[in-house]
Image: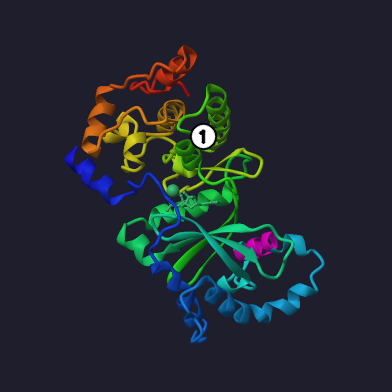
Amino acid sequence: MEEALQKLKELKLRRHSGPSEDEEDDDVTDRYATENNHHRQEYDDSHDGDNKASDRDGAQYEESYRSNKERHSLVQQRGEENKQSNERRLTIHDFDFLSTLGTGTFGRVRLVKFKHDPTCEPMALKMLKKTEIIRLKQVDHVRSEKKILETIHHPFIVELKGTFQTESHVFMLLDYACGGELFSLLRREGRFSNDVGLFFASEIVLAFEYLHSKDIAYRDLKPENLLVDKDGHCRITDFGFAKIVKDKTFTLCGTPEYLAPEIIQSKGHNKHVDWWALGVLIFEMLAGYPPFYDDNPLGIYQKILDGYYEFPPYIESKARDLIKAFLTADKSIRLG
Ligand SMILES: Nc1ncnc2c1ncn2[C@@H]1O[C@H](COP(=O)(O)OP(=O)(O)O)[C@@H](O)[C@H]1O
Ligand SMILES: [Mg+2]
């Protein structure tokens, strides 16, 4: 248990993410420019500064792209090219940087626009700092996040458009889910009605069935990793802990409130942990707080292992049955 706690401390204990005051990441564009042998004297630590530098550095691309007839598919096209060859790769200079959408474990996620195509929809650029990835010993997880996202196409899962890297960062270009995190929506509303909870839960069931059919265990379900798209549908994001699991895996990962008992016990786990987490999520959506809660992660683990939680009176009996069926410690009879 102590060992489990220590390992989990090194991982992602964040429950909420959002634009941060931390300016550390803003200087990355300075480094991108340096990496391309440009001096950024005009850089003023602002987003405008980012754009000025990338405007200039990206000018070389303008000519060739203006003549391209299929402008709308430029990003997809270059994403594909990135996969196939080293030529005409996406670079940081292909984008105008807009707002910060969220902060993750390894850096920010920024809203960007592809500067060579004004008609192109804005996208989300996840920027992962290599020194952080290494410090947190997450190199394999980031590799697997990229590899898995490249194989996934599902309406309720965020789509990876392309990847590229600099000396200091790895970048993942994703489609933008403009409705923000389900977490923010839930905290704003307090709790969801049965219908709203059922709607999101059903979409997650479909996404999990798809992932599990490919032997992918997602392993990080929580409202922070569920985004809402422009049509109000759910988009699962953050595949940092997703893994192809045919039998069992032993890596301790996830978020304390959402961990299945078999993860805490280090018994070996597989995709069944996602169905447990769905039980936690449905409870949290309908109650407004998670079923196993304590100020201290150790207290949370103890409650999960004891299987102790109480329903607030306003959760209906059918919803209770569903939650109980997912929150079954014995994974051989757990719903899923
Ligand atoms: N495609 C996207 N559209 C909109 N916001 C996003 C998108 N991807 C990530 N975000 C925001 O950035 C946050 C961090 O991204 P995430 O992939 O979860 O990083 P981490 O792996 O570090 O947790 C998310 O919780 C969300 O608020
Ligand atoms: Mg996340």
Q: Is 102 in the magenta?
A: no
Return the residue found at the far top.
317
* Mark 1 secondary-structure assignment: helix
Identify the amino acid type marked 1.
His
Q: Is residue 287 visible?
A: yes
Residue at 31 percent across and 38 percent down: it is 256
Q: How is the structure coloured here?
A: rainbow
Query: Magenta residues?
Result: 75-82
Q: Is residue 217 visible?
A: no
Quadrant location of the N terminus in the rendered image: top left
**To which quarter of the image does residue 334 belong?**
top left
Please tell me which residue lies in front, 319 or 306. Answer: 319
Residue at 32 percent across and 57 percent down: it is 137
Please tell me which residue lies in front, 303 or 326. Answer: 303
Q: Is residue 322 above or below residue 100?
A: above
Please tell me which residue lies in front, 131 or 248. Answer: 131
**To which quarter of the image does residue 307 belong?**
top left
Q: Position of residue 224 (x, y in %)?
A: 45, 43
Q: Taken as a whole, is the magenta stretch helix, strand or loop?
A: helix
Q: Position of residue 239 (x, y in %)?
A: 47, 47
Q: Position of residue 302 (x, y in %)?
A: 22, 29
Please tell me which residue lies in front, 256 or 102. Answer: 102
Q: Position of residue 261 (x, y in %)?
A: 30, 29
- Crowding at mark 1 (Cα within 10 Å: few <14, some 14-19, many 20+): some
For mark 1, what is the residue?
212
**To which quarter of the image does residue 2 belong?**
top left
Query: Can you tell me whether the CB of the residue at mark 1 lies under 8 Å from the nearest atom of ligand 2?
Result: no
Q: Is residue 265 left or right of residue 233?
A: left
Task: Report the number of discs.
Answer: 1
Q: Is 81 in the magenta?
A: yes
